[in-house]
């Protein structure tokens, strides 16, 4: 569960639904809560992509820690009639989609044995690892066909990931959690900057639901905003 003051996906979703309904509940909704959640995820990825090109952007506000992602040993030869018995590691499951940023892979891979980072590189570059003069045995990782691959370490069976994913709830199921009760839910702390919440709410209300914010009121005349008015 989220701590007091944390932003959750349910909070953002309910805020949008409440403004759309005008504070009234209706059984006849033109948009479902699940669709609202999808729109929130979509605009979150869009805003992160936009802001990542700006100086001083902090990726840590949106990063998600996924512990103990399982790996399996596979034969590195992909040709049908060739078996060299030369193995490498691959993640058991495909990785969820990462948010597109100016960094090609907004993902960090850590060993569960010594907590050291495993450099993430292009797959074709990893094949030249043996020709590096000073680091031929260094562990390398890369992404191919949405799987995470590792080279030069056949002993570890799990890695820890820190990344920015399009769907944080789906990404949480990649680790050690078992069942919906242990994985991230819409009631857990959501990896998003607080300053981004209002922009997402306004974008969905305006672009998806056709509602426009047209005024702010200061009924107490104290320079503080008491209410915001919306119209369709």
Image: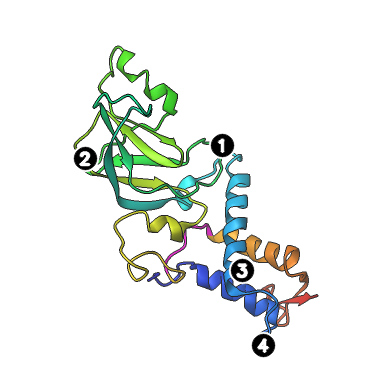
Contact? badges 1 and 4 (CB < 8 Å):
no
Q: Secondary structure at mark 4?
A: loop
| In the image, farthest residue toward the front | 81
For the image, the number of numbered tags is 4
Q: Nearer the viewer, mark 2 or mark 1?
A: 2
Quarter of image, res 170: bottom left
* Distance CA(mark 4)–CA(mark 3): 17 Å
In the structure shown, which secondary structural element does the residue marked by tag 3 occupy? helix
On the image, which quarter does residue 158 sit in? top left
Given residues 178 and 20, the one toward you in this image is: 178
- Of the 4 image quadrants, the one containing the N terminus is bottom left
Numbered disc in front, either 1 or 3 = 3
**What residue would you read off at disc 4?**
24
Q: CA distance from mark 2 to mark 4?
A: 54 Å
Q: Mark 2 or mark 4, which is nearer to you?
A: 2
Q: Which residue is mark 1?
A: 102
Q: Which residues are magenta?
A: 188-193
Residue 144 coordinates in the image, percent (x, y): 44, 35
Q: Position of residue 113 (x, y in %)?
A: 20, 41
Q: Residues within 10 Å of mark 1 (few under 14, many from 20)?
A: few
Report the Cα–Cα distance between label 1 and label 4.
42 Å
Q: Which residue is mark 3?
A: 36
Image check: 227 left or right of 171?
Answer: right
Question: Residue at coordinates 61% horizontally, 68% vertically from top-left?
Answer: 35
The disc at residue 156 is: 2
Mark 2 and 1 residues: CB-CB less than 8 Å, in contact? no
Spatial separation of the CA atoms under disc 2 and disc 1? 31 Å
Labels 4 and 3: the sequence-earlier one? 4
């Amino acid at each position: 569960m989220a701590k007091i003051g944390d932003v959750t996906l349910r909070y953002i979703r309910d805020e949008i639904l409440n403004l759309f309904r005008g504070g009234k509940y209706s059984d006849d909704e033109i948009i479902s809560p699940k669709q609202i959640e999808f729109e929130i995820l979509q605009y979150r990825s869009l805003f992160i992509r936009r802001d990542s090109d700006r100086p001083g952007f902090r990726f840590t506000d949106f990063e998600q820690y996924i512990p103990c992602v399982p790996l399996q040993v596979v034969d590195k030869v992909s040709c049908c009639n060739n078996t060299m018995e030369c193995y490498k590691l691959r993640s058991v499951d495909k990785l969820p989609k990462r948010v597109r940023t100016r960094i090609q892979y907004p993902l960090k891979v850590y060993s569960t044995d010594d907590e050291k980072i495993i450099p993430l590189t292009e797959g074709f570059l990893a094949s030249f690892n043996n020709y590096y003069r000073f680091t031929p045995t260094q562990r390398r990782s890369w992404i191919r066909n949405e799987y995470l691959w590792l080279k030069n370490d056949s002993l570890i069976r799990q890695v820890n990931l820190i990344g920015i994913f399009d769907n944080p709830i789906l990404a949480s199921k990649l680790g050690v959690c078992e069942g919906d009760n242990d994985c991230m839910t819409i009631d857990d702390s959501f990896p998003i900057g607080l300053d981004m919440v209002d922009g997402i709410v306004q974008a969905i209300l305006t672009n998806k639901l056709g509602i426009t914010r047209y005024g702010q009121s200061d009924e107490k005349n104290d320079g503080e905003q008491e209410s915001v008015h919306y119209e369709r």
